[in-house]
Amino acid sequence: MAISGSCAIQGNVLDRVADHRRHHASADREGDPHSPWLHGPSALAVAKGFLHAHLGWFFDRAETNHKRFIPDLLADSAIVEVARTFGRG
């Protein structure tokens, strides 16, 4: 599953899962890496939030703390190897 997920080109499996867990820990609040609602209530802010939530967060985001959000995956040598080899080929 980790290899297949890496084919989606959304980052290595460790980054992706850490971001996903961080998103659920703080959904639509400060700290959510891709909330569309943190830019304000105006039409322009909603449009900016929509773009950020669907694509922008991928390019402009703070790195998620792996030790906090994915300690279980960091302990799995196979998953760490899949993440290490992401993008090579």
Image: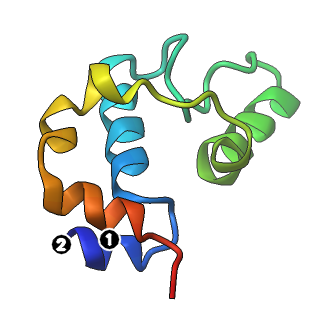
Q: Residues within 10 Å of mark 1 (few under 14, many from 20)?
A: few
Are discs 2 and 1 less than 8 Å apart at CB?
Answer: yes
Residue placed under numbered mark 2 in the picture: 1
Indicate the colouring scheme. rainbow
The residues bearing labels 2 and 1 have C-alpha atoms spaced at a distance of 6 Å
Q: Residues within 10 Å of mark 2 (few under 14, many from 20)?
A: few
Q: Residue at x 37, y 27 (%)?
A: 22
Query: x, y percentage for residue 64?
Result: 47, 29
Tell me where residue 27 sits by quadrant.
Answer: top left
Q: Secondary structure at mark 1?
A: helix
Q: Amino acid at mark 2?
A: Met
Query: x, y percentage for residue 70?
Result: 24, 33
Q: Secondary structure at mark 2?
A: loop
Figure check: 21 above or below 6 = above
Residue placed under numbered mark 1 in the picture: 5
From the viewer's perspective, is 38 left or right of 88? right
